[in-house]
Image (cartoon, rainbow, N blue to C red):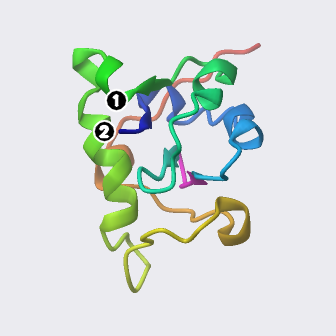
Amino acid sequence: MTYVIGSGCVDVMDKSCVQECPVDCIYEGDRSLYINPDECVDCGACKLICRVEAIEYETDLPEGERHHLEDNAAFFTLTLPGRDAPLGSPGGAAQLGRVGVDTPLVAAMPPREHSGH
């Protein structure tokens, strides 16, 4: 079981969750963040701190967000564009740094309109 980052993160990437994660399992793509399901320890710290409410426990995902469960995992199991192999479990997002590409699902999403804050 794992926590999942949904569509609320796409083109927003608040990143407050990254600092809060005790096991450094939240990785940065191009337009979204992804939780590595093999590294996540289910503590829930990311969900509590997320200001855009984009993170849910996998069994609590709303109907329209359930495809993100498989998609978060795919970020680590697919060979992403421009990469030679799947990411797998690198053992920490900070050491790896920004990956800079997304899964096909996120890459195909229409750009989010940014509202002036």
- For the residue labelled by badge 2, is the local secondary structure a helix, a strand or a loop? helix
What main secondary structure does the magenta stretch of the protein show? loop
Badge 1: how crowded within 10 Å, few (<14), some, or many (20+)? Answer: some
C-beta proximity under 8 Å, tags 1 and 2: yes
Q: Give the range drawn in magenta.
A: 27-32
Residue for badge 2: 69
Q: Earlier in the sequence, mark 1 or mark 2?
A: 1
Say left or right for 3 vs 68.
right
Badge 2: how crowded within 10 Å, few (<14), some, or many (20+)? Answer: many
Say left or right for 38 vs 64.
right
Residue 1 lies, in percent from the top left, at 35, 39
Residue at the spot 31% in from the left edge and 46% down from the top edge: 71
Residue at the spot 34% in from the left edge and 52% down from the top edge: 73
Residue 54 lies, in percent from the top left, at 51, 24
Residue at the spot 30% in from the left edge and 23% down from the top edge: 59
Position of the C terminus, as image quadrant, is top right
Please indicate, yes or no, whether residue 61 appears anywhere in the rendered image.
no
69 is higher (above) or lower (below) than 91:
above
Hey, which residue is sitting farthest bottom in the picture? 84
What whole-number distance in Å separates the C-alpha atoms at marks 1 and 2?
A: 6 Å
Q: Is 78 covered by the magenta stretch?
A: no
Residue for badge 1: 58
Please indicate, yes or no, whether residue 114 appears anywhere in the rendered image.
yes
Residue 114 lies, in percent from the top left, at 61, 23
Question: Given the image, on which type of amino acid does mark 2 rest?
Answer: Leu
